[in-house]
Image (tube, rainbow, N blue to C red):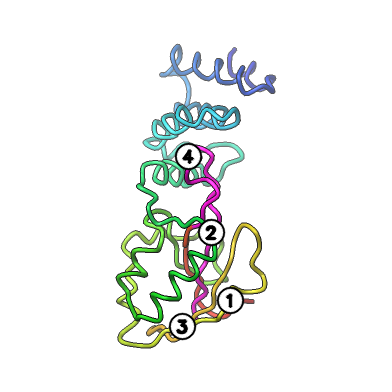
Amino acid sequence: CLNKLIELVNKPEQRIWYYQELIARFPDKIDLGVAYFMLAQSYEQIGAWDAAIQTYTKFLPYYNSSIPGFPDAFGYAKKIVDFYNSPKDWSFETLDDLVKAIQSALDAGSSKLLNKYRAKVNFFAMSWEQENSDTTNMTEFNFSDFMSGNRIRYSPTVDSSSNANEAYLKTWGWSQRISTWYLYFRKINFPADPEIHGRWEWAGVYYGEKF
């Protein structure tokens, strides 16, 4: 049985062949969602990104499939596919460039510029208490709804907890119940696109004081 053989195989190249055979020969006898997701994982492991993205895309209609070891398989696949298909024109070469652009937009009170600089896919807004799996993709997030003519202030530098891959900038003065926000920046980890991989994006907002 191919399913049992897959369990014994360690090399992703071999798993790719087995999953391809399962999908081609027994589509009515297997959970195609599991097969597509695990096939995409194997492609990802060998760096075959175009094939991985295509296979994750095929997996998405099977969002009810339960993938062992991947409690949020659908969310994982959707983030990759959405990012791959996006223009990614909001990224910056360096963290300093990104922070300076946002600080200038805040100084100008420009919600238009802030909306331009934030990520257009997988952008989140959440409290510090929420689990990462609870984040909501805020595709319609609009900063003009939270400024109301207020002067938004910010720390001169990123938070001391920032590191080589992610950073936080404290801001305050937003017109909502929690007026302090930490803007979250991260280095893009996306080997599928070498021109974007390693650049920086404004990926989200954390509400409230940082613990």
Q: Nearer the viewer, residue 1 or 125?
A: 125
Q: Amino acid at mark 2?
A: Thr
Q: Which mark is residue 101?
A: none
Question: Marks 2/4: CA distance?
Answer: 17 Å
Badge 4 is on which residue?
A: 193
Q: Nearer the viewer, residue 210 or 32?
A: 210
Front disc: 2 or 3: 2
Q: Which mark is residue 157?
A: 1
Point out residue 130 in the picture as x, y percentages from the top left corner. Answer: 54, 67
Q: Secondary structure at mark 4?
A: loop
Front disc: 2 or 4: 2
**Is there CB contact under 8 Å for labels 2 and 3?**
no
Q: Secondary structure at mark 2?
A: loop
Q: Quadrant of the N terminus?
A: top right
Q: Amino acid at mark 4?
A: Asp
Question: Marks 3/4: CA distance?
Answer: 37 Å
Q: Quadrant of the C terminus?
A: bottom right
* Chain-order first, disc 3 or disc 4: 3
Dividing the picture into quadrants, the one containing residue 108 is bottom left
**Count of labels in the image:** 4
Q: Residue at x 46, y 83 (%)?
A: 178
* Chain-order first, disc 2 or disc 3: 2
Front disc: 3 or 4: 4
Point out residue 118 in the picture as x, y percentages from the top left corner. Answer: 40, 63
* Chain-order first, disc 1 or disc 4: 1
Q: Residues within 10 Å of mark 4 (few under 14, many from 20)?
A: few
> Height in image: 116 above or below 59?
below
Q: Residue at x 30, y 70 (%)?
A: 112
88 relative to 209 in the view: left or right: left
State which region is magenta. 179-200
Q: Amino acid at mark 3?
A: Ile
Q: Residues within 10 Å of mark 3 (few under 14, many from 20)?
A: few
